[in-house]
Image (tube, rainbow, N blue to C red):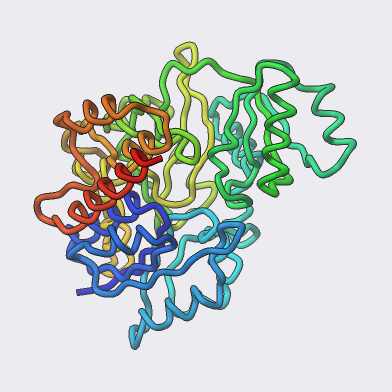
Amino acid sequence: MNNVIVIGKNYAITLGVIRALGEANYHTKLIGLSKYTGIIAGKSKYITDTVTLLSNQTGTPDFEELFCAMETMRGKEDRILVIPLHDATCMVLDQHASQLELHYDIPKTLNNHKNLSYYMDKSIQKELAQRCGLLTAQGKKYNINIDEETHNIYKEVVFPCFFKALFSAEMIGAKNLLTKCSNENDLETAIEKAHEGKCDNVLIEEFLPIDKELTAYGVAANGEVYIPACMEALRGGYSDHKGVAAEGVVKSAQCLGDTKDKLKKFVKEIALEGLFCIDLIQSHGQLYFSEINLRGGGSGYGITLAGANLPGTLADIKYKNSQYGPDDIRQEVHFLNEMIEFEGYTDGYISLEDYKKHMSGGQSRFVKNKSDPAPWKEFKKLVIKRKIAKLLK
């Protein structure tokens, strides 16, 4: 049975990929980038080896430590698939792609003139999306460390606007920077927060009223792109988990209409090899491209539960020379991400009553799993520990 190295910081996302690979008959060697990724995701029955590495102040793992762990896990295998689930890790691996290409299959672009990091620039993504026929919000990028550009922001921006980091991998808590600014005071606060997070480059766009938040999930390899599923967020996370669904529904990507073909064209233009998810906004009945994550996304296991195993497909393509991927899901799935739900409670965004109400529903789950119970047991220990700490506080 082949092994896959999974590198993750968020234990719910990471556990979902581990289980998807296990259900496709692959073992996982886990490099956890946080304490609880090792403690919770690392307890999965599909894990054969676990190493925990702590990232530096920017949230970026040290490459030499990461490479040493990868080499140990590769052992005598000539080639091994690596699935990173963290933006900064994707960038670090991409920056050392020439060193890794001999023995590792990492996310990459087959475009000879552009590396993967180039396409992490949200302004580049928007330009490409527009060329592929996708709608985008009007906007402009700025370097807030240049006084002239900061001065131009206040002259050029029309309120309300939406503020975000140009590169999510540039700072810890990039999702926490996602902010609607209704006036200059809001904008000044957002710029100060970006400075505190050492984020130099930002993207400021027109604010689009949101009817629905959607995410298209897919996998790309060998020039083919598969987008079988679309996730509609019913409730989102807070703070560092903005943009990640606490609760959602997985639907067929057919619901996107001709936007699905435009998204496939977009991914083919990047010439991507790996997992991806594309955030979309429905505003005034029209679909707008927001951004692409060049890695697996937060609700990925929901896609697996719906019958489209994207990590398993990628492994089959790499290890078995498979020429096929899922074009559609088998069933719709209503899910709840226990990690996002619990941290919403412990961080004070939802009440204990709401937390209990949400957790008592019959949705499909990301952590709780009858056939792989050990991670759920560790999660419950964490819940008890933090509940006691919150009550004492």
**Left or right position of 309 against 213:** left
Q: Residue 299's image quarter?
A: top left
Quarter of the image with the C terminus in it: top left
Q: Residue at x 16, y 34 (%)?
A: 331
Residue 214 in the image: x percent, y percent?
40, 29
Residue 23 in the image: x percent, y percent?
17, 58
Q: Residue at x 53, y 15 (%)?
A: 209
Q: Nearer the viewer, residue 267 or 175?
A: 175
Quarter of the image with the N terminus in it: bottom left
Q: Residue at x 55, y 29 (%)?
A: 133
Q: Residue 195's image quarter?
A: top right
User: Can you say whether 186 is above or below 305 in the image?
Assistant: above
Q: Nearer the viewer, residue 264 or 116?
A: 116
Q: Residue furthest bottom?
A: 76
User: Can you say whether 244 is above or below 58 in the image?
Assistant: above
Q: Residue furthest front?
A: 392
Q: How many marks?
A: 0
Q: Residue furthest top?
A: 284
Residue 190 in the image: x percent, y percent?
68, 32
User: Can you say whether 167 is above or below 180 in the image?
Assistant: below
Residue 317 in the image: x percent, y percent?
31, 62
Q: Residue furthest right?
A: 148
**Left or right position of 155 against 118:** right
